[in-house]
Image (spheres, helix red, strand yellow):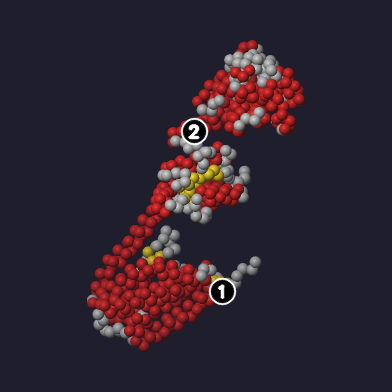
Amino acid sequence: MVPPAKVLGLPIRLFAYVAAVTAVGVPLMIASLGAILVDRPSIRTGASVLLFFALALLADLQPVPMDESGKSELSIASIFIVTTAILFGWHYAVPLAALSVGVTYGLARRPVSRCLFNISMYAIAAWAASLPATLLGTSRSPNAAQLTALVLAGALLHLVTNVALVSGAISISQGVPYHRVVAPGLRNGGAVFVTMAFLAALAANLWITHAWLLVLLAGPLFTLTLYQRSALHSRIAARDARTDNLTGLGNHRSYQATLRELIAESDRTGKPFSLALIDVDNFKPVNDTYGHPAGDDVLILLSEMLGSVEHARAFRFGGDEFALLFSLDEIRSYGASEQIQYRLGLVETLPAGPVTISTGIASYPTHASSAEELQRTADGALYWAKQHGKNRSCLYSPSVVRIYSPEELQRETERNARLRATKNLVRFLDARDPSTARHSETVAALAEGIGLQLGLDAQTVEQLRLAGLLHDLGKIGVPDAILRAPRPLTPDEFETVKRHPEFGHSLLEDLGIEPIGDWVLHHHEHWNGSGYPDGLAGQEIPLGARIVLVADAFEAITADRPYRRAQSAAAALAELNECAGTQFDPQVVTALERHLADEPVAALA
């Protein structure tokens, strides 16, 4: 693609516009100098104009910033330019305005094209400000009303000319229709116009009354400047107090304020809105593996996506927690959340692959009647999404999502933390002996497969998988010398091993994961009552324990051990069938056979 042609660094259309404004402004400045020579001003007039020039230059050199970026500034130089135009005529106001902005831009080392445009624009605007006095004339001693009317009219023309010319440059450079630029410019300049116009009228009347009275204007001008700076600092402080430093999104304080506003608006209009609570999945390993700068990059990327969502305002609470407040109902909010997850999945943010998020969504007033209830329902939906595989959105439904009280949620969080620690202990246990590596994971997969073959519900199947993973937890208390013994165990050693189900059950007691603890306790009970620790038989043995026993036995037979080599899956099944009805539940053994027939790879795991 051929880049657009430029002249002096400007696109052709913008260069043509700048050239046209300059073609008007430069001759106007030359004409003003000629008019001054013809006028042959007195020393008093010259000194007066120089004073107004000095004041205008000082104002241009010390503009008041209007935003935190420093790109928008307010100069009170127009007060002195308009006053000069009305009191002394256009031929003094034009060079005063041009020279004032020219010196300012020159000291700031602005580009030549920008200097020429602004010098010409200010010269044209100064000439426009003088039109009321030029057309209507000014007497040597105008009364206050006449002078004030002329200054106000001149200030209005100065503003309109300034905005009109600047809007043309913005419209061309940004490719925006002219009316979309000039209308906001006039609206935003309205308050400034009123302030500047009345101060210019005050300056003109003070000068006409007694020139030295102009010093009295220093108070209002100082107050105006001080007020503008104070107001800017207040806006910056208010923004910082409600903005997250890293992402630039609203923080928790901003979120709470916006949530209250939306609830009040919804109560007034009946229009629903939705809350989406968002967590980054597995974010701690990102920081631990790739470092906090990489984690910050992930958060910034996500915040940019969230901030660009239509009909929504985005917030970051801290860490990896975000929120979106949609001005939409729950169905459309759910669709927007799914779209965010899809877009995020396309971005390879880390070497390990895309980062995923979980989202919980609830709507007001459909799902809640207060801010607190809305947050609880959305948080319940988020918890469901994280507990059911993550990388998904969950729309709150009372039939699916349980809402936890703060106390219950704290207990659930603590339980999950303890459960994670317990699983890590199991991995450590498997790692102690290379011959049993991945033993618990294999038993978990087999127990899950048996449960599916028996037609058990999804929750029970998930519990079976967890029980298979935790069934040997109690062996953490068995010495390595016994676990790794390359021979059959002695009676005393076997008694030590037989205590591991009870020890495992005691470790699981406070986790609130029943009936898994009972299954772990009884997973060595035999169908005929010859097992341990309680000698239960038949249906007295919990079904989960019977399933774990069969899965455990199959894995043990098909894996290498220090005292014997692994046997084939067929040999293991033959041994299980031989012991069905004495050691094992026959129905469970049959379910394992069906599972292995459907998933032959599982037999080799």
Q: In the displayed structure, does residue 563 sit left or right of residue 126?
A: right
User: Where residue 12 is drawn, which disc sits there?
Assistant: 1
Give the SS element for disc 2: helix
Q: Can residue 290 be seen from the camera position used here?
A: no
Q: In the displayed structure, does residue 476 sit left or right of residue 325?
A: right
Q: Nearer the viewer, residue 464 or 477?
A: 464
Residue type at tag 1: Ile
Q: Which residue lies furthest to the bottom in this view?
A: 38
The residue that mark 2 highlights is: 412
Quarter-of-image position of residue 387: top right
Residue 269, relative to residue 80: is it above or below? above
Quarter-of-image position of residue 47: bottom left
Q: How crowded is mark 1: few (under 14 residues within 10 Å), some or many (20 or more)?
A: some
Q: Which residue lies furthest to the top in this view?
A: 491
Q: Nearer the viewer, residue 210 or 182?
A: 182
Residue 143, relative to residue 179: is it above or below? below
